[in-house]
Image (spheres, coloured by chain):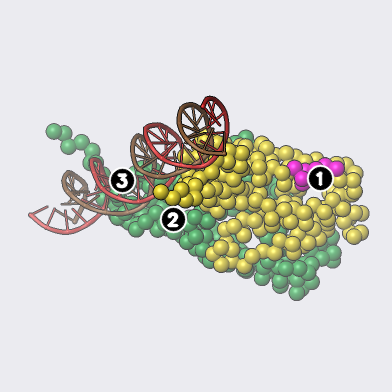
Chain colours: A yellow, B green, C brown, D red
Amino acid sequence: MQPGPPKFQRRKEDRPGEIALAALAVFSEKGFAAAKLDEIARRAGVSKGALYLYYETKEDIFHAVVKTAVAPDVAVLRARLEGFPGSFEELLAIFLPALAGILSVSPVAGIGKMVISEGRNFPELARYWHDELVAPMIGLVSGLIARAQERGEVRLGDPRLFAVQLVSPFLMALLWRETFVPVGAEPLGLSTLAAQHLAVMKGGLLTPANGSGS
Amino acid sequence: MQPGPPKFQRRKEDRPGEIALAALAVFSEKGFAAAKLDEIARRAGVSKGALYLYYETKEDIFHAVVKTAVAPDVAVLRARLEGFPGSFEELLAIFLPALAGILSVSPVAGIGKMVISEGRNFPELARYWHDELVAPMIGLVSGLIARAQERGEVRLGDPRLFAVQLVSPFLMALLWRETFVPVGAEPLGLSTLAAQHLAVMKGGLLTPANGSGS
DNA sequence: TGCTAATAACTGACCGGTCAGTTATTAAGA
DNA sequence: TCTTAATAACTGACCGGTCAGTTATTAGCA
C-alpha cells in the first residue's frame, strides 16, 4: 500500500484567513444569499465541515470578511482625511482621486455592492456596514465640510447632502461596473470621472473667492 | 349542503395585470431571488398554479412588471426632455426636481434597486434593463449636454460622465433609503438634495457666462 | 531511534426545510 | 353538457448546517 500524498494537512493557524479570503471572492461575485458554502470551502481548499470548525454561521463568515478585507482600507482613508492640514480645495484635489483609486482596487467595491443588494433580506448585514463604516465616514466628511463652511470656503447648505454629492458619482460608477459592464455596457473611466468631478465641484461647491481662483 | 360563495371566479382578462401588480410589490420588497411565487400568488388573490396559466417562468413575470410599471414613467420623462425648448440652465431647473419627484413616487426605485441587486446572478435582467431603459436615457441626457456644450453653455468634458454626475446623487439617495433607513439611518431629503444639487451644478457645470448669472 | 496510543483537524454523506415548477382534479360559466 | 380557468397537492432540486467516521500529527515509551 503506497502512502501517496496526504489527503489534507493540519493548518489550524492559516485556515480562518484562507476561508475569509475565499469567502470574499465568492461573496463579491455572487452576493450573500447566492454564495454557496460548498464553493467557499472548495476555493479555500477545505471541506464544508471545516468551515464550521472556525465560524458559527454564514453570517459569521461575512463579518470576518468585512473586518479583514474592508476595514483596513477605510482606516487608511480616515486617517488621511482626519489629519489633513490644507484648505478644503486642496483636500478635494487629494480626496476624489484617492477615492477613485481605492474603488478601483479594493474589495470594498464588491462587498459594498453586496450590502446594497442583500440589505433588505439580511438587515444585520446592512446595520453592521452602516454603523461600522458608512455612518462614520459620512460623519467625517460632513464635519470637514461644515468646518470649511465656517471658514467661508464652501457655500451654505446641508453638509451631509454635500457629502452625498461628493461621493455619489463613484458609487454609481462602481455599480455600473458591477451591473452593466458584464452585459456589454461601456465602462466609465474612474480616473477621468474623478478629474471631471473635481473640476465641477470646485466650481459649484466652493465659494467664488476660493473656487474660481484655481 | 349550502352552495355558499363560489370558491373562485373566472376572470381571464384581469388576471395578468393583477399578477403583475402583486409581483411588482413583492419584487420591490424582496428582490428577485427572494420573492416567492407563493406570495405573489397570494397577494394577487390566486393560487400559484394560476400564475403559470399566464406566464411561463418567474423571469417572464419580471419582464411584465418592467413593461407595465416602469416603462410609462420613463417614457414621460423622455418626452419632457426631448422636446425641451429652453436653455440648458432652465432644463436643469426642471429636470433635477422632476427626477427627485419621480423617484419619490414611482416603482422605478424599487425595481431599479432590484436590478442592481440581482444583476450579477440574473444577467438577462441586467441586459434587458440596460438596453431598454438605462442606455437610452443616458444617451439622451448625454446628447443634451453635448448640444449645450456646442452652444457654449456647458463646460468641456465627457458628456456621459457629466450625465453620471447629474443623476448619481439621486441614485445614492434611493439606495440609502432602501438600504440604510430601514436599519435606523437618517433619511436624505430628496427635495432638498435636488435644490442643493441644482445650485452646485449650476455653479460647476455651466460656463461662467451662463452659470453665475442666475 | 523506532513503535504505538492519544488527540483533534478534517472529511463528506446526510438531513430538514424551502421553493420553482407540474399535474390531477374540481367547478365556474356559456 | 362541455370547455377551461383555477385549485391544491405534489415533485425534485437545492442548500445551510450536522455529525459519525477518517487521518495527519504529536506525545509517550522502549
| Image label count | 3
Q: Which residue is mark 2?
A: B62
Q: Is residue B127 above or below residue A135?
A: below
Instruction: Confirm whether circles 3 and 2 share one chain.
Output: yes
Q: Main secondary structure of the magenta part?
A: helix
Residue B52 visible to an observer of this rendering: yes
- Dot 3 or dot 2: first in sequence order is 3
Q: Is residue A112 above or below residue B213?
A: above
Q: A36 or D21, which is in the foreground?
A: D21
Q: Position of residue C19 (x, y in %)?
A: 38, 45
Q: Secondary structure at mark 2?
A: helix
Q: A149 or B202, which is in the foreground?
A: A149
Question: What residue sits 68% from the left and 47% below the top?
Answer: B191
The chain identifier of the residue carrying mark 1 reads: A
Query: Which region shows up in magenta?
Result: A75-83
Distance Cα–Cα, label 3 vs label 2? 18 Å
Distance Cα–Cα, label 3 vs label 1? 57 Å
Distance Cα–Cα, label 2 vs label 1? 44 Å
**Of tags 2 and 1, which is closer to the observer?**
1
Q: Which residue is mark 3?
A: B47
Residue B111 visible to an observer of this rendering: no
Q: A135 or A4, which is in the foreground?
A: A4
Question: Which residue type does callout 3 highlight?
Answer: Ser
Q: Position of residue A139 (x, y in %)?
A: 75, 39
Question: Which residue type does callout 1 highlight?
Answer: Leu
Q: Secondary structure at mark 3?
A: loop
Q: Quadrant of the N terminus of chain B?
A: top left
Relative to B120, B6 lies left or right: left
Q: B42 or A59, which is in the foreground?
A: A59
Q: Position of residue A51 (x, y in %)?
A: 51, 40
Q: Secondary structure at mark 1?
A: helix
Relative to A163, B177 lies left or right: left
